[in-house]
Amino acid sequence: MLVLLVFLCFKIPQLRYPFYIDEGWVYAPAVKTMALHGPSLLPGSIPPDLSRGHPLMFHFLCALWIRCFGSSNIAIHSFPLLLSVIFLIVLFECCLRLFGHKAAVLLLLLVTTRVIFFVQSTFVYPEIMLAMFAFLSLYCYCKDYLLLTSLMLFMLFFTKEGGLVFGAVIGVDALVAIFRRSENVRRRWLRLAAVLAPACLIGLFFVLQNAKFGWYVLPEHTDMIKPDWNAYYIMFKSGLYWAFRGDNAMYVLVFFIILLSLVPALKFKNIRYLFLIPPAFIVYAQAEMFPTKADGGVIWMLLYILFFTVPVYYVLQLNKTLDESAQRFVLLLGICVVAFLFYSSLTRIAYRYLLVDIIFVLIFLALCTSTYVTTGGKNLFYFAICCIALIGAYGFYSNDRVEDTQLGAFKVMNVQMQELAYLEKENAYNKEIAYGCGYECGPFTDTLEGFLSSGRSFTRMERFPVGPHTEYAIFGNRCGVGDDYTRMLTNPDFQTVYKVRDGEIWAEIFKRKYNQAK
């Protein structure tokens, strides 16, 4: 409860922010449009340039939320925050039933202290919802709650295509279970039907989408899939980097847990407790290398599979008191982590796409940490909690990037909001404004992105260089500072009229010195 309260205290002030990058030009306009025209799960409910061809469960639920609570920035951001809090409670309660109190507490702390989860928890993206239903599908399946399994898989499949990977893992296990004669025949077939029913429904969705638009998946997405081994392997290694190395705190966390494994290894003189060392070395060695050629890639991928095969085997060996459902959960969890990264590597990987994989890895690390601290009593458990909290704090302190998975995103939005407020006060809606990159233009021209307080958009935005009719020029380090800024500093026709800074993020506005452009 304390962890959730602290989490909410930091998150609630961030509800006021507008929409950033992909949520600004795709997801926020999409859910607002669906709320306006009516929530629906059918293809074509919103234009393809907004739906991006994805299943529409996230849009559907968010549109319902908007109809109930309005379309303000605070109201819309409250929806993903609600999902995040529900997910944290679900993680704690389910892991409590699977692995015990220590693992549940450790997992809650591990997830809430990851920057990517903290940032994404108020962003209008489907990744947290995807992770939640992937986890619940796996949990309900392992607990043999068949009706709930079918419902969770339905929600998962209709959230995003990536959910099909987890459904495939569960489906293969259910298919294999058909041949287990130790179980009741009817139960075995019902388990398989629980997977097939939602699979048929999502299949129908894509069939209808093809009938309406002539494609099953948005061509822009399928065009990103390169039938080239070298390109695939580079994406695979990029995914490894972002999942296990991109966040400095994750790197330190794994190192700390490995150090923690020395306690039971020395106490019981049992080398099996050091099972994380070989796979951690394999993954981090691979993640650090970005070769231009994929020589030896097959061998590295086989080693990556061993990354979870070896530790899953030993963590089950060291936790023989786990019941059958918990053991199956751990096994399928490892398979899902491996399979999802293979799937994600088919196209360009964004860090947020890997959120579900990262959370699944954290579940495994929480179980490993619980295994180690159990051998050392309460003091070791509390020591682990303190160290994990400090590592999390280091992750927040050292985070200086500005993507939509990083804390710098809020600084960028804060600077842009103040920049826009100044130009709105100047009533510059119809004045020619020069800007640098596309990320700077959207907040000025698209009222759905939530930056414009008046509801009016700026109508004359032009890319650099500055022209003869330019009246304002905006610069900042969000997109880098180029030669245009250097020339502007010595341009006698312009003067600096506004500066704003938030940490390392800054912006400046220059105005032509005369009332009318020359």
Image (spheres, rainbow, N blue to C red):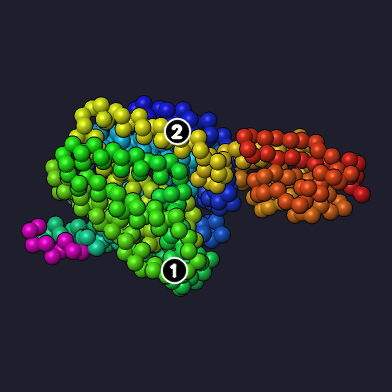
Which residue has dot 2 on it? 393
244 displayed left or right of 501: left
Which residue has dot 1 on it? 294
423 displayed left or right of 453: right
Q: Is residue 404 magenta?
A: no
Q: Secondary structure at mark 1?
A: loop
- Secondary structure of the magenta portion, mostly? loop
Camera-nearest residue between 456 and 507: 507
Image x and y of residue 473, in percent? 78, 46
Residue 313 appears in the rendering: yes
Q: Earlier in the sequence, mark 2 or mark 1?
A: 1
Image x and y of residue 117, in percent? 43, 42
The kind of residue on which mark 2 rests is: Ala
Residue under the image location 56 percent in, 59 percent down: 49
Q: Is residue 50 above or below residue 326?
A: below
* Segment tinted magenta in the rendering: 175-183
Q: CA distance from mark 2 to mark 1?
A: 37 Å
Image x and y of residue 107, in percent? 32, 38
Which label lies toward us, 2 or 1? 1
Q: How many marks?
A: 2
Camera-nearest residue between 254 and 417: 254
Q: Secondary structure at mark 2?
A: helix
513 displayed left or right of 259: right
The kind of residue on which mark 1 rests is: Ala
Residue farthest toward the bottom in the current orientation of the protein: 227
Q: Is residue 179 magenta?
A: yes
Q: Residues within 10 Å of mark 2 (few under 14, many from 20)?
A: some
Image x and y of residue 219, in percent? 51, 68
Image quarter where the N terminus lies is: top left
